[in-house]
Image (spheres, rainbow, N blue to C red):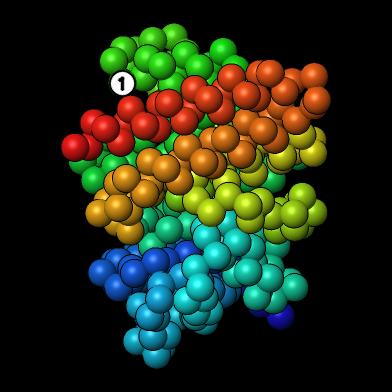
């Protein structure tokens, strides 16, 4: 049987968890050492680590980390973040109950796993938990947000850059004071802990999202199924961010807006909402063109 092992004596909860990691990389050779070093320092050792490498040429060799329960699944065709995460979860032993899905440019603190797992029973029907995400400069990244409906989404899209403190953006991004866990709309896919049974029951990530918005959509479907997304600010990670995308800014703008279009089409799917969908998609495409022009 595969169980989490604990390096030092911990509470009974810690010794009973079945925990694994699925980490999705793309040309991430510069990140693996730091990522795995942070796992080695954790108070909880995962039972299994599956690396899903979407790089054209593999960026990792499991033999370089013989002390870790590590397997590599190479998908050179690059099916996207969500599809890769789903494949990684499918590779896990059936006794794994909780799975961390994350990027390799994240770094754990010693107690990240411990504090996330300690919060699984704070609220009923908790299915996904996320830590506080710190940027490289130490600031808190807004990783626990509200589902962006029409008013919030339009207000945020129009004013976020020119008026960051506007009420729509403030509501969408959420607040980050206090240390108590709280129920939220969705959590950043850069690092989240998912209850495997629920994750699989709702179909995992929607693989039609190549990148961006797959985490928003997952949070929405989790809530629609009657479960909670819970932000746990006492658990922390550091996320350097965009290591695989910073040199492809135009492509990322287009990908982000295509994913936003798909999300809004799922959020407003009914025939009588057709005019709303058309207006929103037209606005997104105009916004994408404007942002691309700002790059030149």
Instruction: In this rendered view, identify the residue nearer to me: 222 or 78.
Output: 78
State the residue position of label 1: 161
Q: Residue at x 48, y 57 (%)?
A: 102
Residue 25 lies left or right of residue 47; in this view the side is left
Q: Residue at x 31, y 12 (%)?
A: 163
The picture places residue 257, in percent across and down from the top left corner, at 47, 37
The picture places residue 35, in percent across and down from the top left corner, at 35, 65
Quarter-wise, where is residue 4 in the image? bottom right
Q: Residue at x 38, y 47 (%)?
A: 252
Q: Please say whether residue 103 is visible from this viewpoint.
A: yes
The picture places residue 286, in percent across and down from the top left corner, at 43, 26
Quarter-wise, where is residue 64 in the image? bottom left
Q: Residue at x 64, y 44 (%)?
A: 218
Is residue 127 shown above or below 50? above
Is residue 238 shown above or below 277? below
Q: Please say whether residue 114 is visible from this viewpoint.
A: no
Is residue 73 shown above or below 219? below
Residue 195 lies left or right of residue 258; in this view the side is right
Q: Secondary structure at mark 1?
A: loop
Residue placed furthest toward the top:
167
Is residue 3 shown above or below 252? below
The picture places residue 98, in percent across and down from the top left corner, at 65, 59
**Where, quadrant-wise, is the N terminus in this rendering?**
bottom right
């Amino acid at each position: 049987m595969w169980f989490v092992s604990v390096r030092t004596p911990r509470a009974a909860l810690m010794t009973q968890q079945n925990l694994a990691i699925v980490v999705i990389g793309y040309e991430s050779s510069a990140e693996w050492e730091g990522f795995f070093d942070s796992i080695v320092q954790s108070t909880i050792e995962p039972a299994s680590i599956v690396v899903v490498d979407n790089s054209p040429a593999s960026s990792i060799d499991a033999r370089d980390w013989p002390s870790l329960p590590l397997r590599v699944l190479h998908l050179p065709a690059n099916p996207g973040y969500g599809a890769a995460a789903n494949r990684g979860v499918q590779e896990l032993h059936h006794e794994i109950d909780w799975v961390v899905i994350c990027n390799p440019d994240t770094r754990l603190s010693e107690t990240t796993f411990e504090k996330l797992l300690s919060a699984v029973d704070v609220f009923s029907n908790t299915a996904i938990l996320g830590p506080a995400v710190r940027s490289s400069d130490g600031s808190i990244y807004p990783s626990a947000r509200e589902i962006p409906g029409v008013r919030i989404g339009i207000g945020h899209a129009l004013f976020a850059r020119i008026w960051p403190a506007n009420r729509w953006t403030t509501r969408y991004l959420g607040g980050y004071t206090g240390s108590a866990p709280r129920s939220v709309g969705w959590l950043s896919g850069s690092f989240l802990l998912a209850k495997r049974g629920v994750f699989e029951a709702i179909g995992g990530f929607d693989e039609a999202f190549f990148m961006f918005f797959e985490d928003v959509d997952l949070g929405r479907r989790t809530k629609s199924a009657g479960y909670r997304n819970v932000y746990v600010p006492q658990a922390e990670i550091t996320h350097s961010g965009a290591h695989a995308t910073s040199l492809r800014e135009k492509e990322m703008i287009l990908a982000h807006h295509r994913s936003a279009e798909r999300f809004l089409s799922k959020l407003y799917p009914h025939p009588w909402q057709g005019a709303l969908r058309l207006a929103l998609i037209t606005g997104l495409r105009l916004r994408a063109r404007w942002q691309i022009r700002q790059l030149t």
